[in-house]
Amino acid sequence: MSIRFTAKARSGVVALTVVSGLALGVAGCGGGGDDKKPEASASVSKGDGSKPSTQEGQSDAPLAELKGPEGLDLKITSAARDSGGFVTVNADLKNDGSKVAILSSQLTGNETEIMKNGQSFGGATLVDSKGKKRYYVLRDTDGRPLTTAGVQSVKPGESVPIFMQFPAPPADTTEVSFQLPTFPSATIQISG
């Protein structure tokens, strides 16, 4: 009887450990020290110069290139539909100017819940003209945007990889307009 109880208790501890680990992983996403963007799950990544892994099958030519203020150049490198029902947009934000570019708080957007979580790219949207819908950056259960966060500035010549996750438009929608405050809009193709 004690062996059965020990086995049940041990399996319960293992299950509790796995659930706790997953909960901590989600809750700790924006808390600092989490420098990697997961490949297939939604997460917030601190933008402190870390480099997320390159998407498989990503070509060298960007989907779009947007010129922003202070010499900032945003190259959208991929927009991939994931099986989880979302679209991940990956980009490189480069400072082509000669001075440090301070990122505008407008990039975070104007939603109170996103703004209270600090600097991010939470103001980005995808617009499906065909379906007449606008898709906002997804949020986790604590209201943190599922996008690179914490990037305050970009040094001259520096390039910072960023990502943003959105709900996926219908499967037959492959072309959307990407919008980010302070940058012009661009039409991009969704793969997958």
Image (cartoon, rainbow, N blue to C red):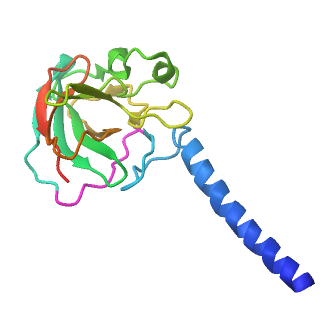
- Residue range in magenta is 46-57
* Vertical side of 9 occupied by 162: above or below: above
Q: Residue 81 versus residue 132: which sits nearer the camera?
A: 132
- Residue 73 at x, y = what percent? 16, 29
Q: Please count the marks in the image.
A: 0
On screen, residue 15 versus residue 62, left or right, reads right
Question: Which residue sits at x=28%, y=29%?
Answer: 155
Measuring from the top left, give residue 113's x and y in whole percent.
50, 21
Task: Place residue 138 in its image quadrant.
Answer: top left
The C terminus sits in image quarter: bottom left
Residue 34 lies, with reference to residue 187, above or below; the image says: below
Q: Is residue 53 magenta?
A: yes
What residue appears at the point 15 percent right and 23 percent down from the top-left corner? Answer: 185
Which is nearer the eye, 192 or 89? Answer: 192
Residue 96 among those drawn in magenta: no
The x and y percentages for residue 54 are 25, 55
Note whether residue 165 is visible. no
Q: Is residue 17 left or right of residue 163?
A: right
Q: Quadrant of the N terminus?
A: bottom right
